[in-house]
């Protein structure tokens, strides 16, 4: 977070003292303006200082210099601020106004602390206090408390606030009071006294509003966001951060650097590592440029953590070591202990372990530059990454680090250190040593932030495993998953739900390992379901009708249209690209601020083996399972469950990577020799994949229609190319539970039966118009084409349709998957647009390039067009997972719809259509898969 008001909202002159009344009033006006709008204050205060100098009014000139110092703290650098405060001291002493000089000394001391010398600042304040009385002493006590925060002396800081607040209240010094309340709220937050923290901040917010202190109000809202993060309320925290950022950018103040750091911590807490790393880098740059030395090492810790999670161990170790050096130089041993652990964590190749310790809650040394607060989350442990820079530390070093962290007030970091020490000890066969560490790490499982509790449950599970209690270990892992799911249920944004799923991985993998060792297919299936596509099972959050959001989406389509026109003309698009990025951020942030919208619900109940067996009928289900580089499969067929070990995943991944290459070659207009070579490559890869994945299961599944639940490298596999799937109805689903929900969905309610058919042709596709018109004729409707095929008409047509066919260019946005889109006449129809649907079509056909492919996040959490339609209630999506030759899709699509209209189920119709055209156009049809459930297209009115 940012330096709280003590660190950046400068102190006012005393309300009283030896100044003449007129001078006092003008001084207060200047100082209040410095708190509200320091940019506007600077020219005003400079003019006042010049006029006062000309008139020989040293008192007023001193006050003007003090106000300029306040503005410099916010806008310029601390060296400039110190120069103004020293000038104010000299002028106050020259005018015989010791209180004015003392006021400037108080501010100068805090600048000294911000520059990385908190002990020197404390010495200066200690020397000043004996000669101060009344409100001025209260201000000095409050400033001294802020410096105690920097030094990690929490009890001394709270004692200072207790001494200062009653005096400030009694004397009506509201300008100082709002800042002290904000500082004290930070200390309450560190001690997990969140109700008290919010109470102080709400009072400070009211005072800032009455006093019209724009900048101070933004600082208070930033701190409110931090408290919301401590509560685990990510949408509320983001809303506060966004409001504060708007003002910081408008006012041009340095607090933006602290805000970026706070937002980075919050983004990291929900798994958005790349965004958090960018925020951390920008924060480091801003703090370096403004010379905020006191806060720089804390932000380095965030950068080290995000770099490690991004696989950059070199930067992680460098930044963590720099933080150790800077904390030590500043005399901050508690933070130095945390930084030393960050180095150890980086050397193990386990970026999850130490740096996230700030998420734990509990009392500790606050970060000085901003009266630091703990972020709201932690990170579960992972297996050590390859390519370590140095030898991993011995378990004993991590044990000593854990003791040091506990003593320094970082209980969450201590838990992570102990778990990591235990895992290293187990690798070395030191079971007793590992148990001692896990026993201590398991203690906070019933209290504290969600991710800390989940981490402690993970420690509990590992401890039980060392004692041979595998059933108890699985129970502990499930308890940890419940904690995480309850926390995730408070999130309303799809990307936050998907990315935060990575914190479930270790617990789900532990339970899956127990199940595989036990050899029971039913248990393996249950644990496999725990670890995949869980966010798609949560009730979708529909954004409320919002004119601002609608305008941003419309503007984005318009800007993208202009960009495409300029690119076709070979002209630069730099300005429009900046506008596009700004609009994308506005839309993304709007959605991330959405709360869950109702009682928190972790999602649909997991479909058990008996439920699946009853719903499958004559079909067979194959769920692929990946653990520690080995591929397994669970089959459910004819009421029987079987578990199969298929072997290493590495050769399967290599073969799966060859398939899209071969299909792309087939899709090109090229020589017969090249097409023959591509076809041979495809046949070879398909045959070997079939031998690895499906032939070993033949005895269990027979020739039944298949429901396939893929994992990892199999997510984008076009299953029809495998010999075992040729001509065979095959349905793919992100999870067995999602398939069951779609297959057993209740019939439409009264008034919703039947529905209409929507057929759309987007621009720029050679065969789209003819394809759409042919499909529309089969269903007796008119196609939306040309200018009529815009985003709003298409959205209106999608809502409540029984069938939708969309022939349009598709784009998968790798960096921000929810901006994946279909290109319509007025621009892109994004996943954010689709989230506005109240009732998704029953069956969706996406005749667009790679429209069936999703971005796969950790835990098989899928983000893409087909996943979005399924999450919003579609029962079947037919789409391609590889590039489609645009001019050649009409034949397979018309064949598909002819069969659908004749009453065939979706998977049967797709398999038959692929069989009909496979001799001529294997590239055009082979990439299509049937995702969801295998349903029939109900006739109108049924």
Image: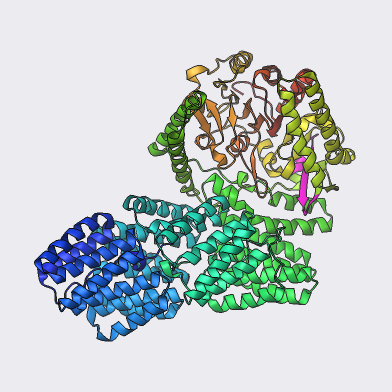
Tell me the quadrant of the picture where the C terminus can be found: top right
Residue 299 spot, x, y in % from top left: 50, 62
Residue 22 lies in the magenta-colored region: no
Residue 294 spot, x, y in % from top left: 44, 69
Q: Which of 201 and 121 is in front in this view?
A: 121
The residue at 43%/31% (across/down) is 554
- Is 905 placed above or below 113 here? above
**Left or right of residue 47: residue 455:** right
Residue 620 lies in the magenta-colored region: yes
Residue 699 spot, x, y in % from top left: 90, 39
Q: Nearer the viewer, residue 348 or 818?
A: 348
Residue 875 spot, x, y in % from top left: 64, 33
Q: How many marks?
A: 0
Q: Quadrant of residue 514?
A: bottom right
Q: Nearer the viewer, residue 742 or 437?
A: 437
- Is 571 placed above or below 338 here? above
The residue at 53%/17% (across/down) is 785
Tell me the quadrant of the picture where the N terminus can be found: bottom left
The residue at 71%/58% (across/down) is 387
* Residue 727 seen in this snapshot: no
What are the residue bounds of the magenta stretch?
612-630
**Left or right of residue 151: residue 843:** right
């Amino acid at each position: 977070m940012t330096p709280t008001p003590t660190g950046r909202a400068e102190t006012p002159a005393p309300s009283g003292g030896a100044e003449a009344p007129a001078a006092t009033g003008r001084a207060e006006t200047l100082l209040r303006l410095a708190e509200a709008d320091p940019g506007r204050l600077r020219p005003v205060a400079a003019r006042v200082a010049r006029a006062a100098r000309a008139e020989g009014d040293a008192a007023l000139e001193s006050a003007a210099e003090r106000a300029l110092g306040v503005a410099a703290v916010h806008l310029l650098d601390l060296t400039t601020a110190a120069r103004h405060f020293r000038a104010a001291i000299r002028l106050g002493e020259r005018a015989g106004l010791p209180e004015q000089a003392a006021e400037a000394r108080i501010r100068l001391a805090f600048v000294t602390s911000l520059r990385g010398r908190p002990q020197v600042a404390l010495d200066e304040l200690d020397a000043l206090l004996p000669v101060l009385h009344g409100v001025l002493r209260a201000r000095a006590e409050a400033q001294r408390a802020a410096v105690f925060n920097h030094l990690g002396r929490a009890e001394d800081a709270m004692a200072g606030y207790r001494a200062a607040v009653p005096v400030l209240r009694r004397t009506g010094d509201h300008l100082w009071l709002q800042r002290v309340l904000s500082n004290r709220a930070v200390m309450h937050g560190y001690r997990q006294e969140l109700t008290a923290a919010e109470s102080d901040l709400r009072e400070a917010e009211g005072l800032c509003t009455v006093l019209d202190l724009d900048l101070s109000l933004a600082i208070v809202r930033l701190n409110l966001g931090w408290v919301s993060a401590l509560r685990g309320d990510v949408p509320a925290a983001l809303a506060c951060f966004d409001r504060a950022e708007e003002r910081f950018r408008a006012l041009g103040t340095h607090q933006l650097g602290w805000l970026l750091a706070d937002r980075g911590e919050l983004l990291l807490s929900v798994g958005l590592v790349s965004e958090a790393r960018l925020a951390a880098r920008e924060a480091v740059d801003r703090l370096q440029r403004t010379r905020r030395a006191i806060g720089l090492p804390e932000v380095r810790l965030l950068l080290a953590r995000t770099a490690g999670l991004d696989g950059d161990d070199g930067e992680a170790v460098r930044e963590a070591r720099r933080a150790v050096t800077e904390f030590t130089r500043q005399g901050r041993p508690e933070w130095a202990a945390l930084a030393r652990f960050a180095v150890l964590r980086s050397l193990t190749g386990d970026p999850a372990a130490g740096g996230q310790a700030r998420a734990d809650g509990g009392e500790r040394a606050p970060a000085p530059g901003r009266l630091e607060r703990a972020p709201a989350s932690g990170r579960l442990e992972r297996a050590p990454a390859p390519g370590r820079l140095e030898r991993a530390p011995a378990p004993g070093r991590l044990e000593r680090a854990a003791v040091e962290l506990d003593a320094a007030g970082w209980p969450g970091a201590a838990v992570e250190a102990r778990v990591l020490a235990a895992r290293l000890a187990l690798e070395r066969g030191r079971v007793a040593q590992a148990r001692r560490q896990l026993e201590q790490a398991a203690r906070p499982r019933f209290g504290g932030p969600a991710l800390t509790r989940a981490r402690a449950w993970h420690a509990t599970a590992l401890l039980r495993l060392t004692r041979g209690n595998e059933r108890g270990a699985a129970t502990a892992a499930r308890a940890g998953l419940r904690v995480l799911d309850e926390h995730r249920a408070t999130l309303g944004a799809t990307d936050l739900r998907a990315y935060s799923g990575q914190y479930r991985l270790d617990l789900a993998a532990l339970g899956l390992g127990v199940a595989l060792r036990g050899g029971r297919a039913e248990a393996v299936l249950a644990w496999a379901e725990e670890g995949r596509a869980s966010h798609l099972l949560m009730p979708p959050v529909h954004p409320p009708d919002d004119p601002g959001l609608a305008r941003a989406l419309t503007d984005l389509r318009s800007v993208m249209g202009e960009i495409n026109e300029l690119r076709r003309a070979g002209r630069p698009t730099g300005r429009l690209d900046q506008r596009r990025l700004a609009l994308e951020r506005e839309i993304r942030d709007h959605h991330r601020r959405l709360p869950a919208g109702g009682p928190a619900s972790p999602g649909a109940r997991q479909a058990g083996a008996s439920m699946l067996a009853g719903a499958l009928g004559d079909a067979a289900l194959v769920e692929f399972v990946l653990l520690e580089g080995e591929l397994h499969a669970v089959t459910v067929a004819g009421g029987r469950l079987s578990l199969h070990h298929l072997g290493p995943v590495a050769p399967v991944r290599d073969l799966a990577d060859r398939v899209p290459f071969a299909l792309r070659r087939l899709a090109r207009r090229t020589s017969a020799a090249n097409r023959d070579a591509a076809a041979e490559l495809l046949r070879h890869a398909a045959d070997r994949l079939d031998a690895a994945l499906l032939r070993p299961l033949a005895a269990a599944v027979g020739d039944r229609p298949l429901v396939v639940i893929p994992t990892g490298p199999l997510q984008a596999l076009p299953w029809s190319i495998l010999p075992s799937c040729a001509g065979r109805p095959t349905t793919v689903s992100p999870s067995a539970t999602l398939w069951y929900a779609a297959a057993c969905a209740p019939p439409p309610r009264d008034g919703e039966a039947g529905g209409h058919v929507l057929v759309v042709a987007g621009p720029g596709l050679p065969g789209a118009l003819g394809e759409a018109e042919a499909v529309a004729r089969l269903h007796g409707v008119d196609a939306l084409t040309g200018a009529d095929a815009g985003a709003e008409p298409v959205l209106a047509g999608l809502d409540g349709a029984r069938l939708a066919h969309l022939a349009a260019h598709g784009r998968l946005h790798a960096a921000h998957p929810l901006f994946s889109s279909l290109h319509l006449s007025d621009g892109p129809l994004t996943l954010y647009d689709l989230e506005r649907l109240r009732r998704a079509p029953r069956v969706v056909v996406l005749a667009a390039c790679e429209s069936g492919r999703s971005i796969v996040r950790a835990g098989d959490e899928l983000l893409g067009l087909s996943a979005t339609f399924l999450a919003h209630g579609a029962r079947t999506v037919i789409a391609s997972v590889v590039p489609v030759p645009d001019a050649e899709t009409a034949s397979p699509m018309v064949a598909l719809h002819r069969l659908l209209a004749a009453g065939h189920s979706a998977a049967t119709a797709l398999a038959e259509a692929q069989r009909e055209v496979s001799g001529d156009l294997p590239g055009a049809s082979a990439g299509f898969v049937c995702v969801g459930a295998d349903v029939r297209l109900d006739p109108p009115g049924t």
